[in-house]
Amino acid sequence: MTGGHIRTVMVTGANRGIGMELVRQFAEMRNPPECIFATCRNPQDERMQELKKLADKHSNIVIVKLEVTDEESIKAAAKVVEGHLAGRGLNLLINNAGVMPPSTLETVDQEDMLSVCKINLVGPMLMTKTFLPLVKAAAKQSKEKGLCCSKAAIINTSTIGSSMGTPPSMKVFPVISYRCAKTALNMLTRCQALEYKDDGILFAAIHPGWVKTDMGTEKAELPVEESVHGILNMLSNLSEEQSGRFLNWKGEYVSW
């Protein structure tokens, strides 16, 4: 990461895939963040062993219990994070947690659409509302000029499948509820950027690529390590010009 130093960062959905790799690569930086908050729904779950091993290896990783659709859980997590920050702000929040169940125009139903939107759209909305005071504090405390991730930023993980300008076919990407939720998330990101620009906070939506993870499956073309490496390089170069925009893991603009 070539930009300014990010002192504090929070990654949701850090128990696997892109989220865990983000935590790993942040921790292994030459000049890593002082606090890396890695969230998951149940830290006691046996599937959390890899994340726990990372936290045992790197003292700056703090595992935080969080359910992104539960306001009380989010508020409780915010208190934990605030306690660890001890007066400092949160420089970077990456809303990464999400689900992508298969669904087509023929099979999707009301329950599927609402449940996917609750996690992939409402979750990031609630996270931003709750953690906004800590991100605003980081912006006020920073000596950085302009907008950047080392000052104060909130990044929402999106997908090329949400693009209305260059959408992949439904045969290639048959996840209609996921695509619709992420399209709405793109607009949320745009509105957040407009609303909080004067508070010194950068917002962006990112497409991480089709990544080899549990969600992306083995058919995906991009190793998770390569995707995350690109994301971190891209984040280090974000500025006011990119705030409110939709970019891919290479830092290229994606059509809304």
Image: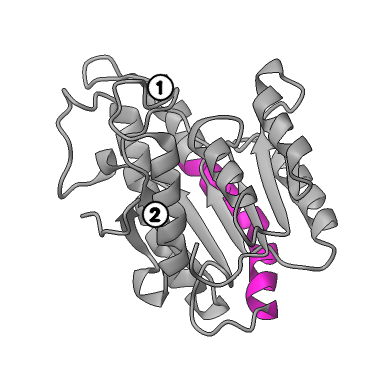
Give the image location of residue 49, x and y in percent.
Answer: 70, 23
Using the image as rendered, state which of residue 103 and residue 81 is in the foreground.
81
Using the image as rendered, state which of residue 186 and residue 1 is in the foreground.
1
Q: In this view, does 202 lie above or below 102?
A: below
- Residue 103: in sight, yes or no? yes
Q: Answer with left or right where residue 222 lies relative to residue 203.
A: left
Sequence-earlier tag: 1 or 2: 1
Read off the residue under disc 1: 112
**Stretch of the chain drawn in magenta:** 121-141
Q: Answer with left or right where residue 137 lies relative to residue 82.
A: left
The label shown at residue 205 is 2
Quarter of the figure that contains the C terminus: bottom left
Q: Which residue is drawn at 48% across and 55% down?
A: 155
Give the image location of residue 167, x and y in percent.
Answer: 17, 41
Q: Which residue is drawn at 73% across and 59% down?
A: 34
Amino acid type at circle 2 is: Ala
- Residue 65: in sight, yes or no? no
